[in-house]
Image (tube, rainbow, N blue to C red):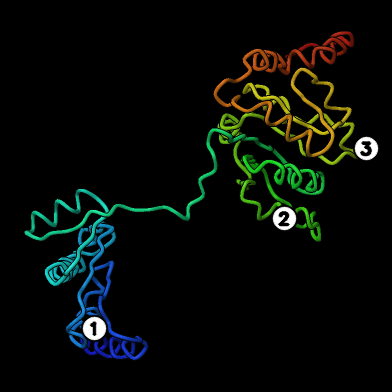
Amino acid sequence: LRERLARATARRLLRAVRGDLRAVGIFHPVQWPLARALLAARPGAELWYGRWDRYEVAPDASARMRERLTVLHRQAAERSALTFVVSGKLLKLEREAGRDAELVGLAADSFPAPDPAAAVVAVSLGHLGRRTDWALLRGVAELMPELVLLLVGERHDEECSGDADFAWCRTAPNLVWLGRRSDEEAARLILCADAGILPFRVEPFNDAALPYRILKYARLGRRTVSPELAGVHTWDRAVTTVAGPAAFAAALRAQAGTRVRPDLELRAWALEQTAERVNAPLWERLRALGITRA
């Protein structure tokens, strides 16, 4: 049945071939029966056999399948006019079996290769929805092809419906959406960044806020780059405020390299902002009322 199916498929493929069939290429032993049928119909053609892995010992194959793949591999390799392999080990195996092969390696031409020396890595921790200034993020991303922005937090698509800038950000290659993460995971992701960002819209609600993320970034020695919002100046020690995408991009570039040279003085300041210290006025008031800790 397999042979009949292979011959029928070969006839169908040959009807689509224009001109002479000079070579048949396969990249897995299971393709050998079809290749054999093609070569039987066109005996002047030669077989090329590419080996990317040692498929006949694949861990996800059953014992029966491994036996079959071993037979198919041997038959294909013995028939092959040109066997090319990607690793020295595969080359050694072919030579140990008394066969020759060409070592060609692999290429990754289509894989992006941004300049690692120019890269600036930023992180945004928290809500990604109506409070986010998507136009600002888009402007910064367009100005900074070297930017890698790690977006850590739950994305609220329903809050951004119809926002063209949000839609653009969804597909921008230098914005990496990581979703909601635990605090332990988020801390490690911040360690991968040069700076934290607060990409909030400039509006009354956001203007009065003091977002936790500023202190979280600072505990790991990272400054926060933020739009001009009044509330964030409460922690001036940890924040750089700017207006517009160009200034935002410049502020991020100024932090390049912090991921390997964290601001340890900023970290020390942030670690001093303990609950006991910042809540001291509240405890004093409680004591004045005659209330003490249990």
Q: Circle 1 sits on which residue?
A: 38
Q: Secondary structure at mark 1?
A: helix
Q: Which residue is identified by label 2?
A: 168
**For the point 24% across and 83% down, which residue is it?**
38
Say the numbered circle drawn on residue 74.
none
In this orientation, which residue lies closer to the viewer: 231 or 48?
48
- Callout in the foreground (1, 3): 1
Residue 90 higher or lower than 133, as above or below = below
Residue at mark 3: 204
Badge 3 or badge 2: first in the primary sequence: 2
Q: Residue furthest front?
A: 19
Q: Nearer the viewer, residue 36 or 286?
A: 36
* Mark 3 and mark 2: Cα distance apart in space: 26 Å
Instruction: Calculate the distance from the C-alpha at mark 1 to the C-alpha at mark 3.
Output: 73 Å
Point out residue 58 in the picture as x, y percentages from the top left corner.
Answer: 25, 59
Above or below, 199 against 161 in this view is above
In the picture, residue 187 is in which quadrant? top right
Crowd band around label 3 with a 10 angstrom C-alpha radius: few (<14), some (14–19), many (20+): few
The kind of residue tagged 3 is Pro
Decide if residue 19 is on the left or right side of residue 72: right
Would you call the spot at circle 2 few (<14 residues within 10 Å), some (14-19), or many (20 or more)? few
- Tell me the amino acid under the disc marked 1: Leu
